[in-house]
Image (tube, helix red, strand yellow):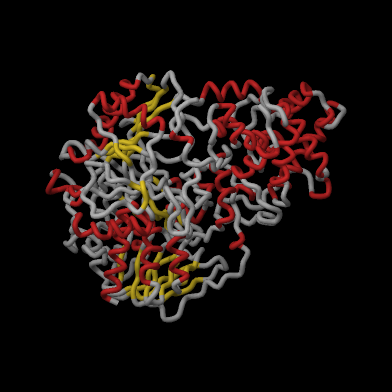
Amino acid sequence: MSAGDARGGGTDREAVRDIDRSPVANADVCVVGAGPAGALVADRLAADREIVVLDAGPRFDPADRLARQERAIRPSYDRPDVWGGGGERDAYSNAGERFYPLNHARVKGVGGSTLHWQGMVMRLHEDDFASETARGVGADWPIDYADLRPYYAEAERELGVAGASDNPYAPPREEPHPMPAFEPSYSDSLFAEACEELGIDMHSVPNARNSEPYDDRSACVGYGTCQPVCPAGAKYDATVHAERAEERGATVIDRAPVQRLEHDADRVTAAVYATPDGEEHRQAADAFVVACGGVETPRLLLLSESDDYPDGLANSSGTVGKFFMDHLFAGVGGTLDEPTRQNHVGFYTSACDQFYDEADAQTAPFKLEFFNYAGPSPVEMALTGDDWGDALLERLRDGYGTHVAMGGLVEQLPRSDSYVTLDSDRTDGHGNPVPEIHWRVGDRALRTVERANEIQRSVLEELGAEIEWVAGPDATGPAYHHMGTTRMSDDPEAGVVDADCRTHDLDNCWIASSSVFPTGGAMNPTLTIAALALRVADDVERRF
Amino acid sequence: MELTRRDAVAALAAVGATGGVALAARRTSDGPGAGGDAADGGEGGDSLPDEAVVRASMTAVATVLYPSEIDGVEAFVGGFLDGRLDGSTHAEGVRAAVGELDAAARSWHGAPVADLTERDRDRLLREVGADTAAEDPDGTLAERVRYYVVNELLLGLYASPTGGELVGLENPQGHPGGTESYRRGPR
């Protein structure tokens, strides 16, 4: 696909500005990655310490967001084009049972994947932390819900979460959400009647999107393109904390992909990074926080192999890269014989967690979502097809207006044969082997996709819908939540990091990422990533 | 349904008026794989049509692309182009594509786009191949006309509230129409 035409957001001023990307002297902490985890850690530590953050991608100009939105709407751009993804920098390989579209699942740059995320922020359930004990499969986390609970509350305040306490299936919470929930949609009211007939409970859903002005950011104004870009800044993204960290004295260096971590037997000593001028630099620090997501984090550790760590840094357990997981999507959609008022906003407002904690060894936890954006967007329809004038308008009127759909997320179990490694046959623009993804999901997840489909189908049939598509076991795909590749464990032989997310092998190296999740649950992971990042910051502060 | 310059302002709020120099001279890629310096067309800067020709041609094409129940096309397109012809490389692409379309009109129909009958304008767009082409700012003439002329004008209309209302969606994707309409039932 083309990535040309500058107004579509393919360029930015930073590219031509002369920026000092040299290392910071006397750095206390070096954070690798300026996504939500790295930015939160940097922000939390910046007031009292010398912090430097290195990110592989650019610092995007906020003035380009409308242009990026145009890219999201226009058919000539793929999803990675919106934020300049792809190419040599982001090359990867697939060698697993299922294809994993990595560059659709991430954004590189200051803000990371929160730049394109949907912005749903649920807490994991209590049993998600004890899957092996409570459900008889998977692994127990070395921490439990109570350990993370205060950090969840803090993360909700940091991100700005609009939510309500009407969900009887959610884990216990101590205080209301920072903002009121978004009101249910018109189509929610249609679903509500059907769900009441079937005994299915609907409730609000927490959004990291401002339902009112919050933290000097606008309330949502309804652009309807949340995923992949919010021009209003009402949807949280990690530029909020990256910029705040800089205001507190941190240094954020963009376009600075870390090539390897230099180390001795028990400490990381420097992050070696490349800059656009072709130079390599060496950032020394007392402590390091690796926050590169579920694929680049294990890749960086594997690229940092040495005589001390011949199988990859921090990999004495042999589990770096292992247990790669994502959530599986389950969905059913169709049409009614009445208007359903879809595509006014790009987020959903009602969900159902009723079946989540019925999970056991045979059935995974799953959640259900009631879409507000079912069916085609008229403006996107208008830009394709060989008609215009009255014929086009007639096609748009026929195609828009009566769709309904439900989605859902399903947990996949951690499996040692689902993993990320290095592809020795292919290198990136710096000559480093690219990540090679081997993704497998397992029968429990696929059975549960089917179970979710049964419920979704029953709701749509109760509504009187003509069902037009089913995302079932054969058509499911990832929710772009890569997790699990440097798992947390109390046992140094079974995991990469301990309960504090500090590597077992290296005293001054932490990992803040969904890569530490021993299991994934079925809730969107970013609130848990944020809570763990705040907890990492506390631990770094305690020890350094 | 009447389109006004106010609708044009709303359309620009949706897809972005870049405001003069904001995106000008930005052609360098912000990501590997971005085709930063690809040519927009066969015409260099010297041969770009002047502003009046671009506006007249775009307005004339819009009368073909927009549904017949729409009035006020000239004011709408004029207002929309006020924001889009802003000195950016995108604006340059629009000018170049209009120039090439106009050249084709003169060559094949003996008159500039703006002077053709509505029927011949429709024919011209189809002869160029803009009806079946997929938009591509770096592509063939058909693909560039689809991108810079046809889809430019359709984007302006259908990302605006008035265009959305034609379809039954008063807050179309791309328009910051607030968070009330999604809660309202059909009228």
Q: Is residue A422 visible?
A: no
The answer to whether residue A474 is visible is yes
Find residue A65 and report its horizontal and vertical position in percent: 56, 51
Q: Residue B32, how many percent across, how many down? A: 55, 54
Q: Residue furthest bottom?
A: A26
> Is B45 placed above or below A248 here?
above
A434 or A153: nearer the viewer = A153
Task: Tell me how many marks there are.
Answer: 0
In the picture, measured across the screen, residue A383 lies left or right of residue B148, that is left
Point out the image quarter for the N terminus of chain A. top right
- Rendered position, A333 above or below A304: above
Where in the figure is residue A24, as x and y percent of width and height?
A: 46, 77
Task: Specify the quadrant that holds the C terminus of chain A.
Answer: bottom left
Which sits in the foreground, A176 or A477? A176
Kindly indicate the quadrant of the structure image that contains residue A241: bottom left
Residue furthest right in the image: B110
Q: Is residue A103 left or right of residue B132?
A: left
Specify whether A103 is left or right of A176. Answer: right
Q: Residue at x 25, y 69 (%)?
A: A505
Q: Quadrant of residue A334?
A: top left
Q: Is residue A426 above or below residue A118?
A: below
Q: Residue at x 68, y 52 (%)?
A: B19
In the foreground, A85 or A93: A85
In x, y percent, where is residue B119?
Answer: 77, 21
Residue at left offset 21%, top offset 62%: A499
* Residue B121 in the figure: left or right of residue A354: right
